[in-house]
Image (tube, helix red, strand yellow):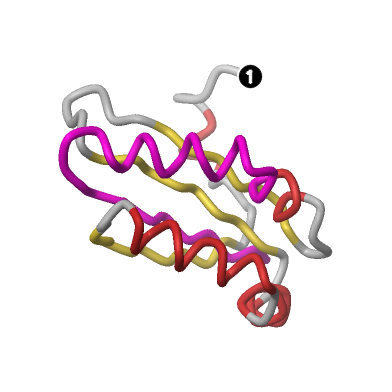
């Protein structure tokens, strides 16, 4: 089982992209990726929305997320969100990591 959180950061005048770039350049993203229990921490840019950035953030457990939320990196994230005046939409998914056989015929590995 894993927990994936999709966070859509939206701002104005390119601020969401600037936020993601500063998260990367500051070393915060790399530090988060090294945390115990982190599976994935990646930013993506929607093709049809220049003012939104998607973060796909995956963890092994809720405990790993809770520990992450207690780190100083969260202060950095919160400060950067405020700096860039970002708004968020959040989706949360729990995976059993099994792909049904009926879906496999549509997947090219």
The residue lying at 45 percent from left, 47 percent from top is 55
Q: Residue 9 in the image: x percent, y percent?
A: 31, 51
Q: How many marks?
A: 1
Identify the residue at the far top of this view: 108
Q: Position of residue 33 (x, y in %)?
A: 73, 49
Query: Is residue 20 highlighted in magenta?
Result: yes
User: 95 or 100, which lies in front?
Assistant: 95
96 is within the stretch colored magenta: no
Residue 43 in the image: above or below residue 10: above
Secondary structure at numbered mark 1:
loop
Q: Which residue is located at x 42 percent, y 66 percent?
A: 92
| Residue 75 x %, y % | 56, 71
Eyeballing the image, is 75 above or below 12?
below
**Residue with the mark numbered 1:** 109
The structure residue drawn at horizontal position 51% and vertical position 62%, both measured from the top left corner, is 77
Quadrant occupied by the C terminus: top right
> Residues in magenta?
1-29
């Amino acid at each position: 089982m894993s927990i994936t959180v999709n966070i859509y950061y939206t701002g104005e005048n390119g601020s969401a992209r600037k936020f993601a770039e500063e998260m990367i350049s500051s070393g915060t993203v790399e530090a988060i990726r090294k945390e115990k229990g982190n599976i994935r921490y990646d930013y993506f840019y929607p093709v049809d929305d220049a003012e939104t950035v998607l973060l796909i953030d995956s963890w092994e457990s809720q405990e790993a997320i809770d520990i992450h939320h207690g780190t100083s990196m969260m202060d950095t994230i919160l400060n950067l969100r405020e700096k860039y005046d970002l708004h968020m939409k959040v989706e949360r998914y729990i995976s059993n990591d099994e792909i049904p056989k009926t879906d496999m015929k549509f997947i090219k590995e």
